[in-house]
Image (cartoon, helix red, strand yellow):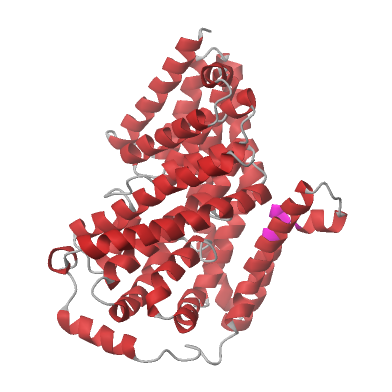
């Protein structure tokens, strides 16, 4: 088929999918599956070819990412149940002090706390952030709110085992160890720079009267009194040490990263290759976390967190799978060769296009994960056509999907209500702050593209 037809047909299907989600309010999983089938039929795959693309795409991404998403959510659910988040924040506060907590919090939320389901992470972290904010000063609320928003949202799409990160890597066929290593290379400077820039701007642009009117004065005084008190050495003296609780997760991530480094070096260590394989490493992480959680909660106490983790992962897996179906249909349509010819050997242009596609989709649909998966799927065929490393497309799609987190996001409303902000205040801390991170992330991705 003519190149112009493939581009136009695919673009039309994506636009229609956005309209069905936004206007008709059909469930995204149903719409993405319908879009995959429509792309196949419109681009000449035929009935059998279309069905094969839809099922193959779903199956392939489940094979690559299904277990990883489930294991990551299970680890997060168990860590939440044993109170690891509260204890980690208390420890960080004791180590770094209140003034450094916005930067520390954004890095923690983006990395070690990423297995926690984001909504739950915010619900648990927000009261602690309020206590810390009282010790920072008049701009404590905006700095902490922006730090949490930037860390949580960036981690979703750049940090293994964040659900968006694993899904995008699955769509593009990026080895998870490689995604972990290069994701961290982009993630850490992105959240640090974005948090610092946002904090500096909000220190001049924040109006407590209009931006945080929901803070009750009596409650604020009580919070400040509590915050000024020295934190206890351990909020749960009889509990399992925090380092032991986090050791299985950190050990799993270390194994994955070590496997990627050894593979890149061309070495062969069979035992390491086995335990460093992402499904095995995260399985070991789940088992280790179950052991330490059982010590904390008892044999029956871990049943509830495990059941909740399986429930949380269900919808995520379906959305990821149908995103893979759409990506496979687009890949088999031949769009990659067409776009590869348009982009030639240019690296910056396709990465900027991926970023812009994900940004536009996010503004329309409001889901970071869906926007990133869709954008990655649309542009995935470009990578082999022009020799572009797929990990760069993954990072560009992820950072683009962060642009303008707004009123369609649970993160926006949770931070708005739990930190006593007005809608105007949340637009500054969440929408503006994460948008800065989106742009900084693109810059870091482009810088990385010159080195790999």
Residue at the image position 35 percent from the left and 74 percent from the top: 129
Q: Is residue 127 above or below residue 178?
A: below
Picture residue at 32% right of the left edge, 67% below the top: 143
Query: In the picture shown, does residue 169 fall above or below 95?
Result: above
Q: Residue at position x 40%, y 51% from top?
A: 437
The number of numbered badges drawn on the structure is 0
Residues drawn in magenta: 276-283
Image location of residue 331, percent across then percent down: 58, 24
Q: Is residue 171 above or below residue 75?
A: above
Query: Is residue 381 shown to the viewer in this render?
Result: no
In this rendering, position of residue 91 left or right of residue 391: left
* Front one among 80 and 90: 90
Q: Is residue 29 visible?
A: yes
Indicate the position of residue 301 as horizontal and vertical percent values: 56, 77
Secondary structure mostly taken by the magenta-highlighted segment of the chain: helix
x, y (%) of residue 189? 50, 56
Quick check: 55 left or right of 433?
Answer: right
């Amino acid at each position: 088929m003519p190149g112009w037809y493939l581009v136009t047909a695919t673009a039309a299907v994506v636009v229609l999918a956005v309209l069905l989600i936004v206007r008709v309010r059909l469930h995204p999983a149903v719409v993405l599956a319908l879009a995959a089938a429509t792309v196949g039929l419109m681009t000449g795959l035929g009935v059998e070819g279309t069905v094969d693309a839809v099922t193959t795409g779903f199956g392939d991404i489940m094979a690559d990412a299904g277990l990883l998403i489930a294991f990551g959510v299970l680890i997060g659910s168990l860590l939440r149940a044993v109170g690891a988040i509260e204890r980690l924040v208390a420890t960080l506060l004791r180590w770094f002090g209140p003034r450094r907590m916005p930067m520390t919090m954004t890095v923690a939320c983006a990395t070690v706390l990423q297995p926690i389901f984001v909504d739950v992470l915010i619900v648990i972290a927000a009261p602690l952030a309020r206590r810390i904010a009282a010790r920072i000063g008049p701009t404590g609320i905006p700095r902490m709110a922006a730090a949490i928003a930037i860390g949580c949202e960036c981690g979703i799409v750049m940090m293994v085992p964040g659900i968006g990160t694993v899904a995008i890597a699955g769509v593009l066929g990026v080895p998870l160890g490689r995604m972990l290593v290069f994701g961290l290379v982009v993630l850490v400077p992105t959240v640090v720079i974005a948090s610092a820039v946002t904090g500096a701007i909000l220190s001049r642009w924040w109006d407590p009267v209009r931006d945080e009117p929901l803070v009750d004065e009596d409650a604020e005084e009580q919070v400040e009194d509590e915050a000024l008190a020295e934190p206890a050495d351990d909020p749960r003296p009889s509990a399992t040490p925090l380092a032991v609780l986090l050791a299985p997760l950190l050990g799993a991530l270390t194994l994955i990263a070590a496997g990627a480094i050894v593979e890149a070096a061309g070495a062969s260590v069979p035992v390491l290759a086995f335990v460093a394989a992402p499904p095995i490493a995260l399985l070991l992480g789940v088992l280790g976390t179950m052991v330490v959680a059982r010590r904390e909660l008892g044999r029956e106490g871990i049943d509830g967190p495990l059941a909740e983790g399986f429930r949380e992962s269900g919808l995520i897996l379906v959305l990821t799978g149908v995103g893979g179906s759409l990506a496979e249909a687009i890949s088999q349509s031949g769009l990659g060769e067409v776009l590869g010819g348009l982009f030639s050997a240019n690296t910056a242009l396709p990465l900027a296009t991926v970023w812009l596609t994900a940004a536009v989709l996010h503004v329309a649909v409001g889901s970071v994960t869906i926007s990133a998966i869709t954008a990655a799927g649309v542009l995935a065929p470009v990578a082999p056509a022009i020799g572009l490393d797929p990990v760069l497309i993954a990072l560009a799609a992820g950072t683009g999907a962060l642009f303008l987190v707004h009123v369609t996001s649970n993160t926006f409303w949770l931070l708005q209500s739990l930190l006593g902000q007005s809608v105007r205040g949340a637009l500054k801390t969440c929408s503006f702050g994460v948008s800065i991170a989106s742009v900084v992330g693109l810059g870091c991705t482009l810088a990385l593209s010159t080195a790999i």
